[in-house]
Amino acid sequence: MLRHMLTTRLQRWTEPPAIVDPWNDAMTAGMRGDYVEAMQLLRPFAEQGDADAQYFLGLMYDEGQGVMQDFAEAAKWYRKAAEQGVGDAQNTLGTMYDEGQGVRQNYAEAVKWYRKAAEQGLDDAQNNLGIMYEKGHGVEQNDAEAAQWYRMAAEQGFALAQYNLGLMYCRGGGVDRDYTLAYMWWSLAVAQNSEPTRKPAQKNMDMIVKLMRADQVAEAQRMAAVWTPKGHQ
């Protein structure tokens, strides 16, 4: 995960920096796996208030890369970045409150941070917020709200949200029961070949197809074939 985030940061430059850039040096060190050097280079930026550096520092403490793993320290840096509006930091901080990792478990706090990230359009956070509404953790249980957030993430192509939305359509949770749509969303999750959703989604498709007419299956397959992520039509 950390290496992926470092790659994303490096891709922000359209051309190499004209002068020696400590940020670039830190990203490059992380890319080659020298996390100790990356940590040393990133820390001054984080301490000076750079939100991206704070998030990366949180990741390094979270994953124990370049430093001893320390969830409490990770949460501290995630919070600093989250308070500056970094969506990934908000979502990760929400997860830490959700699971009680590095902080005292607090579902209401988890929901607060998930919502901030979800409202920025982060698909992972939208799915997490959907889970909180479905389970009634930190919010009043509400299947309709859960389905709404699952849909937002699913329409962006997030496999776990597609799987969860399929479950909602299968049981009629917050939406009208619709086996055709359940089958469609599960087939999209399967097509991504993403764990841990692929096998359970396929298993559910194999079960639900026994309850469907041939024309319903054909329609579900047709919709899945022409579906594209939101914003990519």
Image (spheres, rainbow, N blue to C red):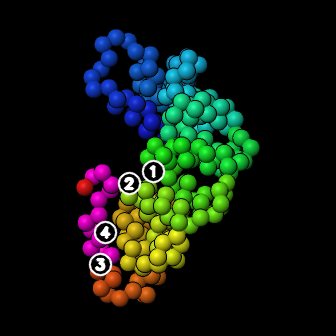
Disc assigned to residue 59: none
**Dot 4: element:** helix
Above or below, comparing residue 128 to residue 54 in the picture: below
Q: Are marks 1 and 2 in contact (CB under 8 Å)?
A: yes
User: Where on the picture, by quarter, is residue 227?
Assistant: bottom left
The earlier-in-sequence mark between 1 and 2 is 1
Q: Are marks 3 and 2 in contact (CB under 8 Å)?
A: no
Image x and y of residue 232, in percent: 27, 52
User: Where on the picture, by quarter, is residue 40?
Assistant: top right
Q: Amino acid at mark 4?
A: Ala
**Dot 1: element:** helix
**Dot 2: element:** loop
The earlier-in-sequence mark between 4 and 1 is 1
Disc assigned to residue 156: 2
Above or below, comparing residue 215 to residue 156 in the picture: below
Q: Which residue is mark 4?
A: 224
Q: CA distance from mark 1 to mark 2?
A: 7 Å
Q: Which residue is mark 1?
A: 123
Q: CA distance from mark 3 to mark 2?
A: 21 Å
Question: 121 or 9: which is nearer to us?
Answer: 121
Q: Amino acid at mark 1?
A: Asp
Image x and y of residue 55, in percent: 54, 32
Q: Residue at x 47, y 78 (%)?
A: 177
Q: Which residue is mark 3?
A: 219
Question: 223 or 16: which is nearer to us?
Answer: 223
Reply yes or no: does residue 227 show up in magenta. Answer: yes
**Dot 3: element:** helix
The answer to whether residue 35 is visible is no
- Among all residues in the image, which is located at the extreme right? 104
Q: Amino acid at mark 2?
A: Gln
Q: Which residues are magenta?
A: 220-232
